Structure formats: C-alpha cells, structure tokens
Image (tube, rainbow, N blue to C red):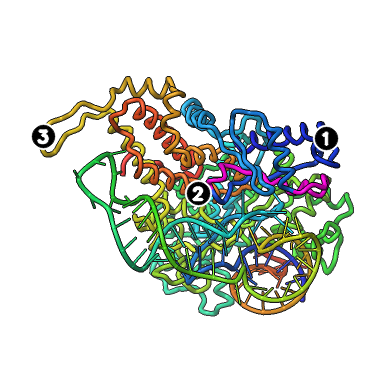
Amino acid sequence: MFKDIILETTLNAIDKAVSNKELGQMESTEGLSFVVEKPKNPEFGDFAVNVSSLARNARIAPPMIANTIANNIDTDKFTTSVVAGFINFKLSDKLLADVVKEILEKKENYGKPVNPKVEKIILEYVSANPTGPFHIGHGRWAAMGSALANLLKFYGHEVYQEFYINDAGSQIQKLGRSLNIRIKQELGENVDFPEDEEERKNYYAGEYLIPVAKKFLEENAPAEDIQVLSDYAKKYMEQVQKDLLENFRVHFDKFYSELDLHNSGKVEKCFKQLEANGKLYEKEGAIWFKSSEYGDDQDRVLKKADGSNTYLTADIAYHIDKIERGFDRLINIWGADHHGYIPRVKASIEALGEDPEKLEVLLGQLVNLIINGEEVRMGKRRKMVTLDELIEEVGIDATRFWMSMRSIDTTLDFDIELAKRSTDENPVFYVQYAHARACSILRNAVSPKLDTETGKTSPAPMSEDELKSALENFDSEAMLKAIPTAKKLVLKLEEFKSMIDYSAKTRAVYTVCRYVQDLAGEFHSFYNSNRVICDDKELMKSRICLIYAIKTVLANALDILGVSAPEKM
RNA sequence: GCCCUGGUAGCUCAGCUGGAUAGAGCAACCGCCUUCUAAGCGGUAGGUCAUGCGUUCGAAUCGCAUCCAGGGUACCA
C-alpha cells in the first residue's frame, strides 16, 4: 500500500537522521508512529506525514525537523516538499501506472493483503425466533452480516457463518396456541385472540399464521395438540426464513438449533461445570450465576424456580460450544436492545475458564422506516413491515446497499421512496451505473460503429485480439501518458487496499459502501473529461486498461456487499 | 437512578488512534448532451461541529459536567 511505503520511508529517514545526530536530542526511533494523511490542498502532494510530534523529543522546531527528515529521503518513487511540520509526498507516475498493472494482474484478488493475520472466525447474526416472518430490522443484520462475512473472507480470514435458532423457549408454545386459533377459524369456528391486551401477549396475532393454518389442514386432519401444532408452525416458519435468506444472498454454513443444544446435554454440562467452579447459588428457589464477580451489574438467574432454564443458560453453553469447536474469534451481531446481555455472556465464558476477549459483539442500532417522508416506528400496534415486503418493493440490491451503508452505531433511516428511485438521489444506482458504463466502453471498443445519418458502419476501434493483448501485455511506458489526467482516479483505485485493511479490522462494512461511491464518482468525473475511444491508439489502449481496472475494482467491492454489478442498465 | 448509542450544512451522514481552510450525497440555484450510457459532469451557496469547563503548542476528535434523542435495565426470548 502507498501508505505503508510512505510510512516506512519516513521512519527510515528518521532513523538515518538520528544516527547522523541531525535530530537534536533524539536518540531512538522506538515507539514512533505517524499517520499518513491526504493533504487538504492537492497542490501540496498526494500524501502527507506530520512530524510535529517529534518537536518535544528533539527540541527543534517542526519545520526544521520536517526538512531534516525530507533531506534523508532518497527514492525515485516520489518527490517531497515541506510545509510547516508536514512532509508532502508526490507520487511518481511510474508508481501510479503500476497500480493499474497490479489490478490487471490480480483481478478479483486485487486488494487482498499480502500477509494477513488470519483468524478462524465464527460470525453469528440474525438468529431470530422461528415464530414469524423477518421484519426490516432482521434485514439490516442479514445484509450487514453477510457483507461482513464476505469482507473478512476477502481479507483472508476463515469465516464460518451461523444462525442460532431459538426454537426451545416458551415462545414456541405460544406459536402453537396461535396456530390453533387460526386453524379453528379456518374450520369456521367463532374464536379469536383475546381482547385483553395482557392476555393477547400470549399469542402471535399476526395474519401470517393464516396460510400456515390452511396448509396444515390440507396436509393433516384437524388437530388441537399444541405440541404438534408448535412443531408444524416452527418448521414452516424456519423454512420461510431460510428461503428468504437464500433469496437475499445470505448464506449460513449452519443453522444451529437451541433444542439440539439442550438434547446434546451441553447445557446441563456447562451448568454443572459452573456449579463445580462455585459460581452458582440458590436464592428464592432459583439458581443464580455470580456474574457480578466479573463486572456484570447483578447476578443472573440460570434456573428458574419452576425448574426450567432461562435463555441465558443455553446461550452460555452455545458460546462455550463455539470456543470448543476451535474458533479463535466469536463475532456476534446483536441489536442494541440486547446490549445488557454482553457482560453476562462474557462473565460466563470467564467463569468457565475461557478467554472472554474472544467474544466480540457488534451492537447494531435499530432501523426506522420512512414512508412518504414519515417515520414509521416498528412494532407496537403499527403494522409491521416485513423484510420480504421491503425486498419486493425496493429490490435486493437496493435493500442490501441501504442496509449496509451506515455505521452500525447509528440508527438507520430507511427511506423506501428514495431507495426505490432510480435517479442520482439513489447511491446504489449511481454505483451500478458506473460499472455498466465501464462495461459499455469496453464493448464499444471492439464493436463496429453504425453512423445513424450516413447509414455506414465504420470498423471497430480495436479488434478483440488487440483488446486481449492490451490487457495481458501491460505497457507501462504507454500508461505513463494516460496517468496525468487520471491521477485522482488511480489514487482511488489504490486506496481500495487500505480501505479493505481498515474495514476488515474495524468490521465496518459501511466504509465499503462509501468507497464504492467515491470510486464511482471519480470514474464519472474522468469519463466526462477524457475520451477513452480516441484516435491516439496507444492512449486508447492505456485508457482501456484503466477502464478495465475500474470495472474490476467496482465489481470486487460490490461483490463484497452482495450487490450485483450489471453489465448493462 | 444506572448502562449502551447518537447529537456536525435545510435533510441523510462521513471525519473522532488530536494537526494545514471541517467533508460527501441529496435538496436549492447556475451551467454542460451533433462524440464512448445526461441513471452523468462542472460550478455557486449553505457551519457557534448540542452546551460549558478542562488537558494540549494545537480539540469536531481526548476528559469531566449538563441538555436533547433512541435503546436497555425480567425467574421473556
């Protein structure tokens, strides 16, 4: 990466200056760190390093320090200049031309770090109850989670994607009772969900169980056994969820059933282990876990007074199981409403002798839907908008992009009208259009052109073979001619590498969205002031290489986001 | 009360490991299609970075306090 090269060069120069005793009282370069930034004013250069922080140790004024260091830089990769405490770096055209070359060589692998520090990661997200259709909030985790998985894999990590099915709690009985009512209604009985608000909470009154009831009656004789109905509805909803995820380009390696976890004896085993470690006690008929010993606000119940387990009990076993399966990093995406849960899960991991640092929880703020400019809060009495309705309305690409484009720390406003629009107000189309436009140029370069006025066809600007040869036998010398008007664009193409590095390390999918918009912008701008298909054949070939590089990087980035890169629009 | 997020342009948001004149998109206004996709480009205008105090040569960025918004604070999942 350019940033690394510059950093290394700077540190070497400082080393040299220190050993030459040119930096006053500075005696060592140990522990020094600098940030490579972009100068505010592009006239200054392409990158800059501020060395003012050395002033204190060296006891020399920042401009002097910068000059001394700059004088110790000896390379033809870039030219340097000094303004105040800043060393500005201007990259050579050769270095920039090499970026295009690298992209053409590495193609879909361009941007992968050379020696990444690889981890075996299990990424858990969505993990909804199988009691109903996904709502739009699940959509955010699905889009972000799958994009994060793609990103981490692209970086080089080994990523295992998992969906934890909460199929063991009391909510399953609730589902069965609700289906029972829907079935009776189908049979013409005059029954309905309780009017009383408190009692109604024991049911899922949503209409989505009506088709389930119909299907049940098609396949079975009428039944009232709640256990049978629960199982049926659960399986049905699980399938509905799985189908939707697949359609939404979200692929889990495993759907992990909580019920299986219980049946395997792992829950009981963890419980016993905690007991043996002296971390449990009885109070008011329930069994409590001393999570407050590990920083939690208070202790937590694991076994209720009625003898049943709480949700936490199974969750502890689940996380221990992840560690026992050999993953060295557990990443969970949880909604912000679960934040209080983190200390107790970490406490349990520690109490069982494992490293709680392995668990990394990404807390996501919730989603607000904007319909006709009005905020529609989810849940409560309002009509719940489901994820499949949203996808139906705005499409998979737009939904995925919009769900991923904001920092996970900020509440997402999903404006349906905007996301549906195919104009410049919509960033998805802006980016996809750039890709389609690049493809179009590559097509035109090898297509004969029909003049609509004269009716004559002129030969293609270049033959298929010439195109192939231009891409395969990269001409660095010729590229130097194309660089001056494409500088910003090439810098942006190079930035893909540092973007990947940063995004993967900070788990920030939204930076990929931002990057791809920036790159599209640079390309559109380039397109408007430079003709690719032109009379100067050498220049045309170089620009074709450039266009191919842009198309490649756009596609790589969109692929990570799980958004399609159309050849035509 | 306590815990977690956030508060930056009219709107939606970047920037937050402290550094040059605080950025982008949209909306507004003015321009650009006889040439590779105008779903595009160029330009103008728009700011007390919630507020106060502190740390620092230097604060949108770090610390403390206050205010505002959302979420959490179950022997529910």
C-alpha gap between disc 2 and disc 1: 47 Å
Q: Residue A191's spot in the image, x, y percent?
A: 45, 73
Name the amino acid, label 2: Cys
Q: Residue at x 36, y 46 (%)?
A: A433
Which residue is the site of mark 3?
A455
Q: Residue at x 63, y 56 (%)?
A: A334
Q: Badge 3, how many Cα within 10 Å: few under 14, some, many 20+? A: few
- Given this view, does label 3 or label 1 mark the residue nearer the observer? 1
- Image side of residue A320 versus residue B23, left or right: right
Q: Give the secondary structure at mark 3.
A: loop
Q: Give the secondary structure at mark 2.
A: helix
C-alpha gap between disc 3 and disc 2: 44 Å
Residue A21's disc is 1
Does residue A527 sit above or below A113 in this rendering? below
Which of the marked residues, 3 or 2, is nearer the chain's N terminus? Answer: 3
- Given this view, does label 3 or label 2 mark the residue nearer the observer? 3
